[in-house]
Image (cartoon, helix red, strand yellow):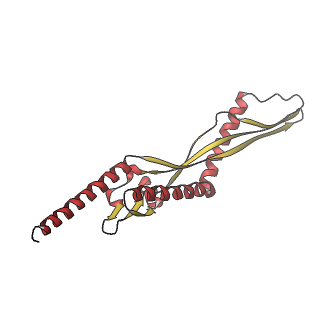
Amino acid sequence: MKIIYPLFALSIVLMSSCAKNNTNELYQELKSVDKMVLAKMSITKTVTMNKENPFGRRKAGYSYDTYARAFIDLSTLQAEDLVFNDQNQTVQVFLPPVEAELMGRDTDMHEVYTNITGTRYQLDEKDLTKLKEEGNESMRTEWEENPMFKAHLIESAKRKARKYFENIFEANGYVASIEFKNSEKRDNEKHN
């Protein structure tokens, strides 16, 4: 009987040591991902020109797609953001905030309509470049002022992140509770 107790105690120490190593490996694996893109969307932007004078008119509309993405930066994940309870086989996960950003646009513009009359000349590359620049400026303003775009993208990313991390931890024997850190705190840190 006395031999069983030390063996039992040794097996508990070994099991807890393996669990600690396993959780540390899991943390290191997650942190090494860096930016994890969870959702993408395209936003079609239409830009127009409307110029008239006694010699005719130049009206045109062109469209192109702008792309946005939502991601979490796992390089900022800290060891204390994963709170394991080996006794209950649960883990509380505090993920970095989901961030959304514009990431580019189509280089080509698609003609929606043109109406050029009189002695007015056709649109040239200079006109199209000016339309693109106006469209880009307008898109950046809409992105910053209209929370609908970001909110939709961020909510989609959060749903995917929860499912993904629940599955990762379940495969490692844990039931995960996923929360996201406050992005306002992070924004304040960036500005200080």
Where does residue 174 sit, x and y in percent of width and height?
A: 38, 62
Is 89 or 57 nearer to us in this picture? 89
Indicate whether 13 appears above or below 35: below
Q: Residue at x 56, y 59 (%)?
A: 155
Task: Out of 143 and 179, give the one closest to the viewer.
Answer: 179
Which residue is most to the left?
Answer: 2
| Image quadrant where one finds the N terminus | bottom left
Left or right of 59 on screen, residue 104: left
Q: Is residue 95 above or below residue 52?
A: below
Q: Position of residue 87 (x, y in %)?
A: 30, 68
Q: Is residue 140 left or right of residue 3?
A: right
Q: Is residue 83 above or below residue 122?
A: below
Point 73% across, 42% down: residue: 47
Quarter assignment of residue 107: top right
Tell me residue 115's x, y (percent): 85, 36
Side (left or right) of 22 relative to 10 = right
Q: 42 or 119: nearer the eye?
A: 42
In this view, the residue farthest toward the bottom is 1
Residue drawn 41% across the image and 63% down it: 176
Q: Is residue 57 left or right of residue 39?
A: right
User: As rendered, which of 136 and 83 lies closer to the eye?
Assistant: 83
Q: Where is residue 158 shown, x and y percent of the image?
A: 52, 58
- Using the rendered view, name the quadrant where residue 109 is placed: top right
x 60%, y 44%: residue: 67
Quadrant of the rendered image containing residue 86: bottom left
Say if 81 sits above or below 113 in the image: below
- Residue at far front of view: 1
Q: How many numbered callouts?
A: 0
Q: Which quadrant, please, contains the C terminus?
A: bottom left
